[in-house]
C-alpha cells in the first residue's frame, strides 16, 4: 500500500484522493482551507463529453479534433485522445456520485453549446457546474475518509518539495497557526495547486491561486511548459474588488455580443463570423472584444426571465448584486480578463513531472490544451488528470528508503524564524501588486517584444531586491516567503512569451503576427542557478 | 467611515477592540474595505497608534466560497456580498463569528462543520436517480458554502453538542434523495442530530447567502421519516 501526498483539495486533488483510495493506496490530502474554498467552485459553464445521445454527427473523434485545432495544433494527439475518450465514463461516474446535473425533458443530462464547439457537447449544472461537482466529490471523499483511506490535513500551505537526487520524497508545509514548518513524507507527491491568477492581480479566479507552488518547484528543478499561453475570457465584469466571470453558457444559450455605433447595435461577432460568431473560441472572441471601438455588451435579455432564471440564475444574481443590473431587461457591459493558464508544470501522458515520484494535475499541470483551451475542457481535464495520476502511482514501483532531510529542514526553519523576527512594517503585498502591474502592462492580450523585455527587466529588478527586504511579520509569513518564487515564475512566463516569435492561440504578438511551423511545438523552460533555458518539444514525446 | 474591529492576535490571546478611519465609497464591499485598510502604507488606528494588519479569510470574493463569513454590524454575513451602500450609519463594526474558535482577528476555525458530517458518516453509497421534480431543490442545496452563517444565527446550535444545524439537514436531504442503500442510516442521523433539536426559528433561511430553503429540505426529510 502506497502513501500518496496530494497538495490541493479542489476538483483534481479530490478526484486523485478518491481514486488513490479506490486503488487501495492511502491518500494524505493537504490544503490550507476546505475544498469549498477552492477555485474549482467558480467553474461555471460545464464539462465536455460525447455521450450516446449526442448531436447528429458528433463523435469522440470530433471532440479530439476540435480540442487540437482550438489549441493550434501543439497539444499532443495521444494525450488529447486519452482525455476525450475517457470523457463519457467521467460523466457517468460523476452522475453516480451524485452531481446534480441539469436534465433535459427526458431526464437525461442536458447539453449546451460552448465556445469553439461545433456541436452541443457541454454537460452542465446550471451555471455552477464546478460547485456542484465539488459538493459531490467532498461527499465521496468523506466515504473514504470514514474508511481511513483518505486523511485530510488542513491549515497547511505548501513551502517546498523534499527532493534528493531528482527524486521527490514529500513536501514541507508552513502552518500559519503554529508558525512552524511541517514535513510530510510520501511515496508519491501530487500537486493540485491550481493556476497562477494572483500574479495577474484581479482575475476571475481565487486569490488563493498564486502560482507559488509552480514557481518554487521550478527553482527546485521541475520543468514548466507553455507558460506564454494565458487564456483571456471574453466576458467578464468589473467590480471594485475583482473581475467576475459571465459564463460562456450565456452565449451558449443564445446571448449576443454587440457595441453601439451611432445609436445602432453592431453585432460584430455575427457580422464577422456568421450566426455562430458569438461562440467562436475564446482567443478569437477576446481579441475581437479588445479591438472593438467602444464598450462591448452581452445581451441575454431576449431569452426571457424564465430561461434565465432556470439556466443562468447565477448570472442574474451576480449582475443584480454586483452591478445593480437586471439582465432580463438590460445588457451587461463586458471586457476580457485573465481566466485560465494553459501553461504550468510539464507532465507526460501519465501526469509525471520530470522529477521522479512527483506528479501534477488540474490547472497547475500543462497538458491537453495547447495554445488555447476549449471551453468545457478544464473540468474534464481536472477530473481526468486526478484519475490518471492515481492510476500511474499505483502502477509504479515504490522507492527505497527516504534520505535524511533534517539539515535542509533546519535551514528552512531558520529562514522562517528570520521572517517572524522582522520588525519591518513593509508589506509584501506591495511587491505582489507590482508583479501584477508589470504582468498586465507588459503581457496583455496584445504583446510586443519591446514590452516583454521591459517586463523582464522590471521583474529582474524586484528579483534582485526581494531577498534583501524585510517584510511585515504581522502579515502572513507565506506572503513574505512566496514572493521570490512568484517573481521567478513571472520572469519565466515573460521569457517564454518573448522567445516565441510568432502568433498562436492566446499568444498574440503584434510584431510577429504570423503563425510559424517552426514553433508548432510546446515550449519547455527549465531553471538552473538563475538561468532560464527554453526548448521546444512535442507534447506526446515529453 | 469609522470601522471598529474585534481583534485577537491568535487563538489564545485576549480579544480587544480597535477602530480605524477610512475613505470609502458606497459601492465597496466590506471585503474591498478590508483590503484597502490592509494595503495602506502603514496601518494606524483612530488614535494614531500603529496597528497590526487585519487577518481575515477570503478566496473567491464573489459569494461562492463562504470564506469571508463574519458578523457585520451585528448581523452575520459574507464580507464580499455586503455593500457599504446598505450600511445605514457611518459606522461599521466587524466581529468574528461567535460560535467558532477564533484563529486570529476575523478568522475562525470552522472544522467542526466537516467533523460533524464525518461523525454522521454523511456519504452517498449506491446512487439512485432522484425524481425530476426534486432537482431544483437538490441543485440549490448542493450550493451550500459551509460558511457557518446558519449556525451563527441558530438559537439551538451550541458548539460541541448533539444538534448539528441547518447545513446538516440540507446535506442529509441531498444524500438521502440520491441514495439507494443508505437511506435508513441517513434518516437516523438526521433525526438524531437535527430533527430532535430544531425549534424552527428559521433564522437560518434568512441568513443563508445562497438562499437555501432549509424548511423545504426539512419537509422532505420528515416525510421520508414517516414512510
Image (cartoon, helix red, strand yellow):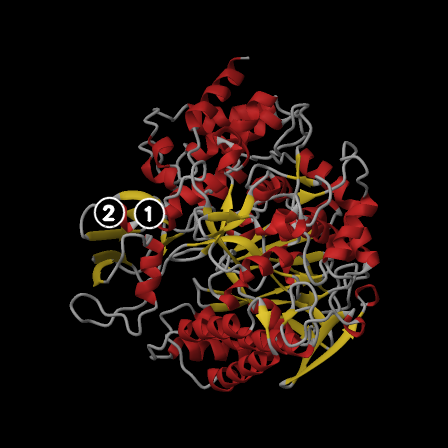
Label 1 to label 2, Cα distance in Å? 8 Å
Q: Label 2 lies in what chain?
A: B
> In this orientation, does residue B173 appear?
no
Q: Quadrant of residue A121?
A: top right
Q: Quadrant of residue A49?
A: top right
Badge number at residue B87? 2
> In this orientation, does residue A73 appear?
yes
Q: Secondary structure at mark 2?
A: loop
Instruction: Residue at 33% x, 52% y: name it.
Output: B29
Is residue A4 toward the left or the right of residue B11 in the image? right
Which of disc 2 and disc 1 is earlier in sequence?
Answer: 1
How would you rate the neighbour count of disc 2 (Cα within 10 Å): few for under 14, some for 14-19, many for 20 or more?
Answer: some
- Residue A273 in percent (x, y) is at 67, 51
The residue that disc 1 covers is B82
Q: Quadrant of residue B183?
A: top right
Q: Nearest the camera: A509 or B90?
A: A509
Q: Nearest the camera: B181 or B48?
A: B48
Q: Nearest the camera: A75 or A298?
A: A298
Amino acid at each position: 500500500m502506497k502513501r500518496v501526498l496530494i497538495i490541493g483539495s479542489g476538483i483534481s486533488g479530490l478526484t486523485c484522493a478518491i481514486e488513490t483510495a479506490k486503488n487501495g493506496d492511502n491518500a494524505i490530502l493537504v490544503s490550507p482551507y476546505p475544498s469549498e474554498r477552492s477555485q474549482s467552485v467558480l467553474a461555471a459553464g460545464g464539462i465536455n463529453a460525447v455521450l450516446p445521445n449526442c448531436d447528429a454527427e458528433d463523435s469522440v473523434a470530433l471532440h479530439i479534433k476540435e480540442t487540437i485545432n482550438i489549441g493550434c495544433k501543439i497539444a499532443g494527439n495521444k494525450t488529447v485522445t486519452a482525455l476525450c475518450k475517457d470523457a463519457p465514463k467521467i460523466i457517468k461516474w460523476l452522475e453516480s456520485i451524485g452531481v446534480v446535473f441539469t436534465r433535459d425533458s427526458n431526464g437525461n443530462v442536458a447539453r449546451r453549446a460552448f465556445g469553439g464547439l461545433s456541436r452541443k457537447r457541454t454537460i452542465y449544472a446550471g451555471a455552477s457546474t464546478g460547485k456542484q461537482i465539488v459538493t459531490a466529490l467532498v461527499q465521496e471523499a468523506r466515504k473514504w475518509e470514514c474508511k481511513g483511506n483518505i486523511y485530510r490535513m488542513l491549515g497547511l500551505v505548501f513551502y517546498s518539495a523534499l527532493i534528493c537526487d531528482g527524486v521527490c520524497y514529500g513536501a514541507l508545509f508552513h502552518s500559519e497557526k503554529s508558525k512552524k514548518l511541517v514535513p510530510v513524507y510520501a511515496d508519491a507527491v501530487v500537486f493540485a495547486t491550481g493556476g497562477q491568477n494572483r500574479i495577474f492581480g484581479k482575475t476571475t479566479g481565487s486569490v488563493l491561486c498564486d502560482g507559488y507552488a509552480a514557481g518554487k518547484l521550478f527553482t527546485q528543478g521541475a520543468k514548466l511548459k507553455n507558460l506564454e499561453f494565458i487564456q483571456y475570457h471574453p466576458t467578464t465584469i468589473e467590480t471594485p474588488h475583482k473581475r467576475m466571470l459571465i459564463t460562456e453558457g450565456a452565449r451558449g444559450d443564445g446571448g449576443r455580443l454587440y457595441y453601439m455605433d451611432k445609436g445602432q447595435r453592431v453585432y460584430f461577432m455575427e457580422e464577422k463570423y456568421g450566426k455562430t460568431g458569438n461562440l467562436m473560441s475564446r482567443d478569437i472572441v477576446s481579441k475581437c472584444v479588445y479591438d472593438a471601438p467602444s464598450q462591448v455588451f452581452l445581451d441575454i435579455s431576449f431569452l426571457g426571465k424564465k430561461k434565465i432564471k432556470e439556466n443562468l440564475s447565477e448570472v442574474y444574481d451576480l449582475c443584480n448584486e454586483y452591478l445593480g443590473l437586471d439582465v432580463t431587461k438590460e445588457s451587461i457591459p463586458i471586457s476580457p480578463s485573465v481566466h485560465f493558464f494553459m501553461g504550468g508544470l510539464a507532465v507526460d501522458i501519465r501526469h509525471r513531472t520530470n522529477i521522479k515520484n512527483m506528479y501534477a494535475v488540474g490547472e497547475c499541470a500543462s497538458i491537453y490544451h495547447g495554445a488555447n483551451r476549449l471551453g468545457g475542457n478544464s473540468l474534464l481535464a481536472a477530473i481526468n488528470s486526478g484519475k490518471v495520476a492515481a492510476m500511474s502511482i499505483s502502477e509504479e514501483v515504490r522507492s527505497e528508503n527516504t534520505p535524511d532531510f533534517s539539515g535542509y529542514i533546519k535551514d528552512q526553519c531558520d529562514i522562517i524564524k528570520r521572517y517572524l523576527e522582522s520588525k519591518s512594517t513593509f508589506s509584501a503585498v506591495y511587491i505582489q501588486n507590482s508583479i501584477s502591474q508589470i504582468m498586465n502592462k507588459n503581457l496583455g492580450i496584445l504583446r510586443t517584444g519591446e514590452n516583454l523585455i521591459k517586463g523582464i527587466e522590471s521583474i529582474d529588478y524586484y528579483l534582485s531586491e526581494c531577498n534583501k527586504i524585510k517584510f511585515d511579520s504581522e502579515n502572513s509569513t507565506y506572503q513574505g516567503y512566496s514572493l521570490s518564487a512568484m517573481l521567478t515564475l513571472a520572469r519565466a512566463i515573460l521569457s517564454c512569451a518573448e522567445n516565441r516569435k510568432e502568433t498562436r492561440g492566446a499568444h498574440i504578438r503584434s510584431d510577429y503576427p504570423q503563425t510559424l511551423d517552426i514553433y508548432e511545438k510546446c515550449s519547455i523552460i527549465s531553471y538552473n542557478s538563475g538561468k532560464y533555458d527554453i526548448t521546444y518539444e512535442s507534447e506526446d514525446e515529453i | 467611515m469609522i470601522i471598529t474591529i474585534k481583534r485577537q492576535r491568535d487563538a489564545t490571546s485576549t480579544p480587544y477592540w480597535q477602530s480605524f478611519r477610512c475613505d470609502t465609497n458606497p459601492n465597496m464591499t466590506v471585503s474591498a474595505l478590508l483590503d484597502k485598510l490592509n494595503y495602506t502604507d502603514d496601518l494606524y488606528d483612530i488614535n494614531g497608534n500603529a496597528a497590526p494588519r487585519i487577518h481575515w479569510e477570503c478566496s473567491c470574493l464573489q459569494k461562492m466560497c463562504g470564506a469571508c463569513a463574519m458578523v457585520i454590524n451585528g448581523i452575520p454575513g459574507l464580507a464580499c456580498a455586503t455593500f457599504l451602500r446598505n450600511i445605514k450609519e457611518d459606522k461599521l463594526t466587524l466581529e468574528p463569528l461567535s460560535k467558532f474558535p477564533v484563529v486570529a482577528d476575523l478568522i475562525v476555525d470552522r472544522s467542526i462543520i466537516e467533523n460533524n458530517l464525518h461523525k454522521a458518516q454523511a456519504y452517498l453509497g449506491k446512487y439512485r436517480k432522484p425524481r425530476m421534480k426534486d432537482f431544483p431543490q437538490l441543485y440549490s442545496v448542493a450550493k451550500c458554502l459551509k460558511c457557518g452563517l446558519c449556525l451563527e444565527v441558530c438559537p439551538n446550535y451550541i458548539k460541541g453538542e448533539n444538534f448539528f444545524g441547518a447545513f446538516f439537514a440540507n446535506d442529509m436531504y441531498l444524500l438521502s434523495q440520491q441514495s439507494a442503500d443508505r437511506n435508513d442510516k441517513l434518516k437516523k442521523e438526521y433525526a438524531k442530530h437535527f430533527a430532535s433539536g430544531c425549534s424552527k426559528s428559521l433564522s437560518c433561511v434568512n441568513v443563508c447567502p445562497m438562499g437555501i430553503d432549509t424548511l423545504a429540505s426539512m419537509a422532505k426529510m420528515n416525510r421520508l421519516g414517516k414512510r
